Amino acid sequence: MPNAVEVAGLRKSYGEKHAVDGLDLHVAHGEVVAILGPNGAGKTTTVEILEGYRSRDAGDVRVLGQDPQSGDRAWRSRLGIVLQTNNDLAEATVGELVHHFARFFPDPRDPDEVIDSVGLREKVTTRARQLSGGQRRRLDVALGIVGRPELLFLDEPTTGFDPQARRSFWDLVEALADGGTTILLTTHYLEEAERLADRVLVVRDGRVVAEGPPASLGGRTARQAVVRWTQDGQPREVRTDTPTQVVVELTGTLGGEVPGLEVLRPTLEDVYLSLIDGGTS
Ligand SMILES: Nc1ncnc2c1ncn2[C@@H]1O[C@H](COP(=O)(O)OP(=O)(O)OP(=O)(O)O)[C@@H](O)[C@H]1O
């Protein structure tokens, strides 16, 4: 089966600004892919082109087998798009909105189950305009998933969420992914990408500068580890390609338990920051 998303050589400029500048991307069916990148890197522009909301200047784009520029209603009903709640709808309640949106789709999820899954049960009779920012975003997500999409786009889905809401949202995304939904998300939260994504793409200046599973992005697993411990009351540290060997030797030298032992690898954040600073490793 072809990929759910297939993009080659995508370009989009706004006047002189090359917002997307030769971007390649694919997402397999059932995969969760996160796009990371600094403000202005071209993430939203890319996602909006894939959703069919923005035209492109060049490049080949296929989303669920169709060019988004000519996507019809049947195609659109297979996508889940999380929009900011439209202010025209702000007078409707959470329950009314989710039930209303469900009617647009041929095989929707049970709206009440969707409301429960995004944690808005207690707000079901509250008008959209009376929700907090984070609750409003959860309503946006509810409207994005009620149509049982094959492919779900999440553009910075947890911005404004408190830590508890973010964790329950992650559980929800994992459940959707386990159920076979293909997901393309953009985020500024590295922890979110690490937790949810099978694969991460780092975008800078409209291009992909690194790509891979979060654990090995940018050669992360290949980078040297730092082993720290305390010896004779002094902190000690070595950088090494073979931390296990170092620990075994220390255990022998110190006759057992190694005081203050730590083995550190670069975090995803360390790798990400070096990539967007212009480093290539
Ligand atoms: N409608 C527009 N008109 C002109 N320039 C635009 C427009 N939309 C985006 N841009 C510019 O294109 C570039 C890419 O913007 P885009 O919103 O795609 O970035 P992003 O990676 O999603 O950023 P953020 O992380 O801040 O959401 C930016 O320099 C932005 O200023």
Image: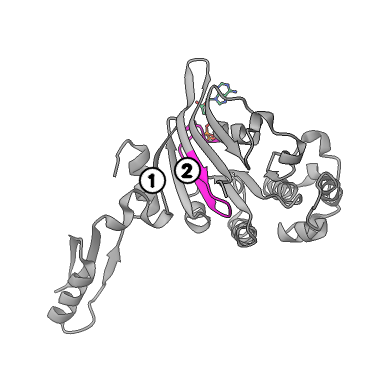
Of residue 78 and residue 39, the one placed in the foreground of this image is 78
Q: Which residue is mark 1?
A: 272
* Label 2 CB-ligand 1 distance < 8 A: no
Q: Which residue is mark 2?
A: 36
Q: Are marks 1 and 2 in contact (CB under 8 Å)?
A: yes
Q: In which quarter of the view is residue 253 placed?
A: bottom left
Of residue 230 and residue 151, the one placed in the foreground of this image is 151
| Mark 2 residue crowding within 10 angstroms, few (<14) / some (14–19) / many (20+) | many
Residue 41 magenta-highlighted? yes
SS at mark 1 in the image: helix
Q: Amino acid at mark 2?
A: Leu
The range drawn in magenta is: 25-43
Q: Residue at x 30, y 40 (%)?
A: 280
**Residue 264 place in picture, x, y as percent:** 30, 62
Q: Is residue 26 above or below residue 22?
A: below
Give the CA distance from mark 1 to mark 2.
8 Å
